[in-house]
Amino acid sequence: MLKDFTKERFDIIIQAGQSNSDGTGIGDADVPYVPKEDIYYLNANMTISVASERVVANDIWGDYSLTFADEYRGSGLLKNGRNLLILRTSVGGTGFLDKRWGLQDDLYLHMLEMTQTALELNPENRLKAFLWHQGETDALLNASYDTHYGNLSTLIKTVREKFHCPELPFVAGDFVQQWVGENAEICKPVVGAIRDLCRDLRNAKFVETNGLLSNAQKLGTDDTIHFCRNALYELGRRYFHAFMEITEQ
């Protein structure tokens, strides 16, 4: 029998950005994520499913929102009778300069549509956090500090305005440090813009990624741009700790 999600009350998390947000980390996990009956995904096709890691070919792909959700649930923030709904709006290889996340662009508009859909399922549904990881594409396209700062600032401010949640916690993070080391010149303005925006905005935090391995470092591949699966788990925990710093201010 199909579940009627209009009868469920959700705490909603927006998960947005590109491939490290979508989850492309592989390799072993110290403690593999176990799906929970009260943690769900709203997928890009507007279906709702129990949140779980994806299996792609012979690999399990990690997702930092899952450990964020586990921490949220385990901390007692998810009250009795409520579920957690993660909006999976991220798409790999996308940015502002390639016309995907600007105010008139497809992914931004689809994120708004998914958020509105989630809120309208039940009048007691509530937005709780905006988790963002993106910027590698804009770095590769040589985005300036001012351009990236302006684009990201506009995105978060318009989301808060549209959904009448001016205090919505916003968390963003640094890139894989191996890739930053290989591409320092193009990364510096973009990462600097994200870090400074998180300092300048109310209810925003920037997450450092020191010590988090890439797929290349974990598995000996040539993929230096993506966090490995185990690193994504830790990234989710770091995002949650940043979220708690915001909410406890």
Image: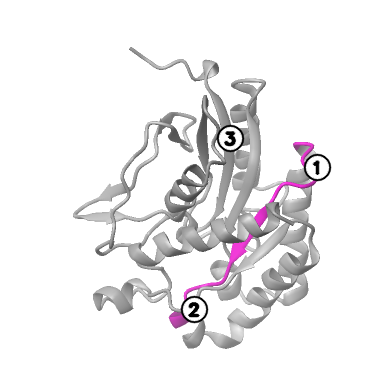
| Quadrant in the rendering for residue 127 | top right
* Marks 2 & 1, CB-CB < 8 Å contact: no
The vertical placement of 41 against 69, above or below, is above
Give left or right: position of 95 versus 194. left
Q: Which residue is mark 2?
A: 210
Q: Position of residue 153 (x, y in %)?
A: 76, 59
Q: Is residue 9 or residue 132 the one in the foreground?
A: 9
| Quadrant in the rendering for residue 50 | top left
The vertical placement of 197 against 15, above or below, is below
Q: Which residue is mark 3?
A: 11
Residue that sits furthest to the top in the current view:
1
Q: Position of residue 57 (x, y in %)?
A: 21, 52
3D distance between C-alphas at marks 3 and 2: 30 Å
* Residue 124 visible within the image: yes
Residue neighbourhood size for the residue with mark 2, other residues' Cα within 10 Å, grouped as few (<14), some (14–19), many (≥20): few
Q: Which residue appears at 46% of the width and 59% of the height?
A: 19
Question: Is-magenta flag for residue 49?
Answer: no
- Mark sitting earlier along the chain (1/3): 3
Q: Which residues are magenta?
A: 163-179
SS for tag 2? Answer: loop
Q: Position of residue 34 (x, y in %)?
A: 31, 44
* Residue 99 visible within the image: no
* Marks 1 & 3, CB-CB < 8 Å contact: no
The vertical placement of 148 against 90, above or below, is below
Residue neighbourhood size for the residue with mark 1, other residues' Cα within 10 Å, grouped as few (<14), some (14–19), many (≥20): few
